[in-house]
Amino acid sequence: MRSEVYRFVATNGLLHALFSLPQQSSSALKTHTILNETARVAFVSEISTSDSSAQVIADLPSGISIYLPLFAWKGEGWIFKSDAAGNGASIVSADDLLHILSESGFYIDNILVKEEGSSKHKENTIILMGSELTSLRVFSIEASEQLVLREYSVIMPSSSDARLPEECEQLSKVRVGIVGMGSIGSKVAVSLARSGIQRFLLVDDDYLVPGNLVRHELSWAYVGVHKVNAVRDALKLVTAGVGVDVKSHRIAGQESALNEAAALKDLANCDLLIDATANPEVFLRMAAIAKSNKKPLCWGELFASGYGGLIARARPDIDPNPLAVRSSIYAYFDTLPTAPFQQAGGYDVEHEQPLVAYDSDVGQIAASLTRFAIDAALQRNPSQFPYSAYLIGLRQEWIFGQPFDTQPIDVQGDNWDDAGTSITDEDRLAALKGLIEIYKESQHAESGSAT
């Protein structure tokens, strides 16, 4: 492949569609070609069937065909299926190709069609295939001053594409709600998509700026775009069939109370909740949603300077409820030496000193949180993680004796049905702020209707 500029990627879905076509038939197709510095890579996204309906290639991520920053060039073409056309004959020129198609009984006048408003002909992709997979050949044909034919090198799917455990099939039915699309949240979302999660709700109001790129999962292709929209588009390039709902909203922020209620209601409809904000007020709301709707909640954060981090979970009727888990973690912190650095600011970094840490530090905590989330989503029993919370050391500091030193926390507390969960002053203050915001919103609505 090193010397091959023109490359064609055949997915399993495409091969299945090609084999399902009848012999001695022709069908229109839609292509998308990605241009980069060393190669021109083509994909088929859709084939027209005999009844004029369109068969979408299901295992091609939708981002290939709709995502503009890829500069995926849209094209058209034809698949000609015939043992006569796919007999491995020498094809070195456009005339050779047209002659073989004509001799095989195909109508070829529609191969070279002029573009609307131009004297140039469209460049079409031509696929030839007989009854055997080895007969598959792909060409592009273009008419400028003369006919130009190029043959693509075909990249077949590997014989063993199953690189995930069988249990990942269960994950496709799980809807995951993630609040916070910063460095940790973005990495968790992409990793979950690679693991089999196909239904997401992403919540964040921020947009990507150049300074985020030292640790964020995304790149300069998304700078200036709201993070929820950017991560959504990234997920659509990672896996086929992914469905992503987004809400550009700041939970527990200076937002409309009505919008807040809508966001929280949609989060309640998720099967698994993840708080990636490191914001106590956001956690309070997420904990309330999880407890009232009996949905598992996972959360995690990196400690400032990147010396370690925390991951935790609360599963309905298995672990203590989320507030009890958090209270138990804080009680454990009280038994430890004072941390050299406090917990890092997360959601409201514009009001705090930004986090100083390497991308690899964030990646360690995000990867651990993802593993926690997958375990909760699969409802493994017993869990692969015997504790509900872990402190993860990334270097020798504080209580960590060495890098990768992991300290489990044995959490205790009220279950999910107990009304006596301990509420801290911080929780009461956050709840009071929420009530005040709702009151202000209702007063504003009443005054607006009066006028």
Image (tube, rainbow, N blue to C red):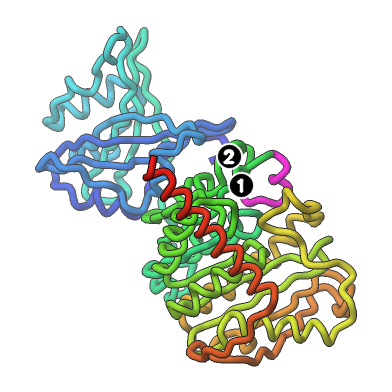
Rendered-image quadrant of the C terminus:
top left
Q: Which mark is residue 222?
A: 2
The reply to whether the magenta stretch includes residue 216 is yes
Which residue is farthest front?
450
Expressed as whole percent of the image width and height from the top left, the position of residue 133 reads: 30, 51
For label 1, the SS is: loop
Expressed as whole percent of the image width and height from the top left, the position of residue 404 reads: 78, 74
Up the image or down, 341 lies above or below 319; here it is: above
How many numbered circles are shown? Answer: 2
Residue name at image x 48 percent, y 46 percent:
233
Indicate the amino acid at tag 2. Tyr
Q: Is residue 162 left or right of residue 345?
A: left
- Labels 2 & 1 near each other (Cβ < 8 A): yes
Q: Which residues are magenta?
A: 210-217
Residue name at image x 31 percent, y 21 percent:
94
Expressed as whole percent of the image width and height from the top left, the position of residue 339 reads: 87, 73
Quickly name the residue at label 1: 218
Q: Is residue 233 left or right of residue 102?
A: right
Residue 160 visible from this viewpoint: no
Q: Which mark is residue 164?
A: none
Residue name at image x 25 percent, y 40 percent:
87
Residue 205 visible from this viewpoint: yes
* Figure quadrant of residue 401: bottom right
Specify few, some or many for label 2: CA neighbours under 10 Å numbering under 14, 14-19, or 20 or more: many
The reply to whether the magenta stretch includes residue 390 is no
Q: Main secondary structure of the magenta part?
A: helix
Indicate the amino acid at tag 1. Leu
Up the image or down, 438 lies above or below 229; here it is: below
Specify few, some or many for label 1: CA neighbours under 10 Å numbering under 14, 14-19, or 20 or more: many
Q: Is residue 447 left or right of residue 399?
A: left
